[in-house]
Image: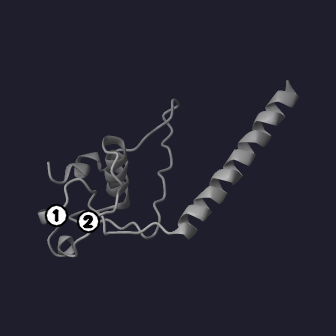
Amino acid sequence: QLFWEKRLQGLSASDVSEQILKSMELPKGLQAVGPGGTEASLLSAVASALHTSSAPITGQLSAAVEKNPGVWLNASQPLCKAFVVTDDDIRKQEERVQQVRKKLEEALMADILSR
C-alpha cells in the first residue's frame, strides 16, 4: 500500500503494566510529506526503512513529492523531505550517548553497592 503508515495511526507502544510509552522525538530537520503526514507516521516509516534495508535514508530527493506525494518518486525511502546529517548532529548524538552511558554506569554501581 502506498500510505501504509496511516494504518498505524492512533496506535502506541506500552510497557508490561500497560502504561503508554512516550514516543521518540525526531530531529527538527526530518519533516513528513504526504496526506496526514504526522511525526508518528514518519517515525514508523523511518523505523521500517531502517529495519528492512541497509541503504541509507535520505528522504525524497525530488521537490515534486511536495506537490504530489502520491507520486512517491523513490519507494525505498520514507515519505519525508530530503535531509542531511551534519558532523555537528553526529557530535551532539555522541555526547547524548556518552551522558546516558554515564548515568547507566552510575545506576548500576549504586545497585551493586546497595546489595
Element on which disc 2 rests: loop
> Which residue is drawn at the image coordinates 16% and 63% (left, top)?
73
Quarter in which the C terminus is drawn: top right
Q: Which label is found at residue 73?
A: 1
Q: How many marks?
A: 2
Circles 1 and 2: CB distance less than 8 Å?
Answer: yes
Instruction: Answer with left or right where residue 47 lies relative to residue 26.
Output: left
The answer to which quarter of the image holds residue 52 is top left
Q: Which of these two is toward me, 80 or 37? A: 80
The percent position of residue 13, horizontal first and vertical second, equals 43, 40
Q: Which residue is mark 2?
A: 60
Farthest-out residue, right? 113
Q: Is residue 5 above or below residue 115?
A: below
Sequence-first disc among 1 and 2: 2
Q: Residue at x 83, y 35 (%)?
A: 110
Amino acid carrying label 1: it is Leu
In the image: residue 13, left or right of residue 113: left
Q: Secondary structure beneath disc 1?
A: loop
Q: Is residue 59 left or right of residue 71?
A: right
Nearer to us in this view, 21 or 115: 115
Determine the CA span between mark 1 and mark 2: 7 Å
In the depicted structure, whether residue 76 falls above or below residue 108: below
* Residue 91 in the image, given as x and y percentages of width and height: 61, 63
- What residue is at 34 percent from the left and 57 percent from the top? 42
